[in-house]
Amino acid sequence: MSKSKKKELGKGLRALLTNIENTNSPKEKTELVKELNSSILEIPLANIEVNPFQPRTEFDPEELAELSQSIKVHGLIQAITVRSVGGDKYQLISGERRMRASKLAGLTTVPAFIRIADDQALLEMALIENIQRSNLNAIEVAISYQRLMVECDLTHESLSERVGKKRSTISNYVRLLKLPPQIQSAIKNSEISMGHARSLAGIDEVSLQLDIFKEVVAKNMSVRALESLIKSYNEPKVVSAPKMSKELPPEVKKVQDELSANLGTAVKIKRSDSGSGEISIKFGSDREFNNILAVLEKLEG
């Protein structure tokens, strides 16, 4: 974005916040708050202060490093939420882990939803109204549900009553936000459907998720075909030898999942009881191979 474009955006935001603060008309204020809460704006990290009432004070360094690496490769998919505290300053409402990881990734600005200090009820109305739109993709719906629960302090049960959806439906959407960035992007770009995403979200192993996801896209697989494929993975395999392979130790499986998420492809680790083994990384094209090499070089650095 050019400097002039950023400047225009900043002016528009300040004007909108000023209008909200100055208006005495409930109807006009409602419309202005809806406009503000439906937009995601890029704001400087240097202008955001941490909420002093944030209950969480400790963050796992390894998890932060993993998220930071993902942000370097894929960008920050889920925007943070801040409130305006006057001028160009903001206070964080939710997303401190994402904000810290963005700083580690070297970002200077982040996408953010911006709220005003006393718009709780209006925010709830605006988000619920936003969910009713027919052109939202599944990730946008999931983010709206997540915002309602976090920012408006709603449970799955109370949210289901407010939006007229089953509790299980809300849970299925929110689970999508735990999928790897590559799969979330595919949902947003309509490469796969909500049905595909829901099936993939039921897979616990990240490397297997990515492996099956790539097969779905490559073969333009239907949801029913995907469900059959997942079922085949879950069925016990007939082995010719009586010797059964042992599961990976938890710490090794965690490394396997982290490598799969960072590299954006399936990574398999085989390890013997003595500690010897091998790591295999799948790629489907020269472009994927070069992307993997680029990520590995960053990890080394």
Image: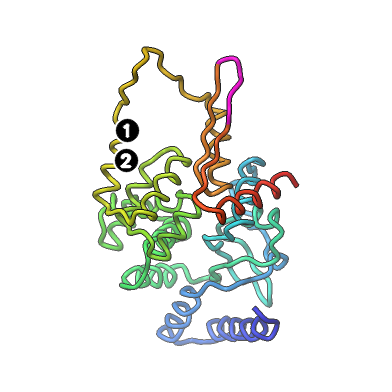
- In the rendered view, would you say 278 is above or below 220? above
Identify the amino acid type marked 2: Ile
Residue 129 image offset from top left, x and y in percent: 35, 72
Gap in Å between the C-alphas at discs 2 and 1? 6 Å
Question: At x 47% / y 41%, what residue is drawn?
Answer: 206
In the image, taking residue 87 as reference, residue 13 lies left or right, namely: left
Question: At x 24% / y 49%, what residue is drawn?
Answer: 224
Identify the amino acid type marked 1: Asn
In the image, taking residue 34 as reference, residue 228 lies left or right, namely: left
Residue 130 image offset from top left, x and y in percent: 37, 72
The secondary structure that dominates the magenta segment is loop
To which residue does mark 1 refer? 234
- In the rendered view, would you say 180 is above or below 26? above
- Nearer the observer, 50 or 184: 184
Instruction: Write the start and end of the magenta stretch as one range.
Output: 273-278
Contact check, label 2 and label 1, Cβ < 8 Å: yes
| Callout 1: SS | helix
- In the rendered view, would you say 241 is above or below 203? above
- Nearer the observer, 103 or 85: 103
Residue 16 image offset from top left, x and y in percent: 55, 84
Q: Residue furthest right?
A: 301
Q: Residue furthest front?
A: 286
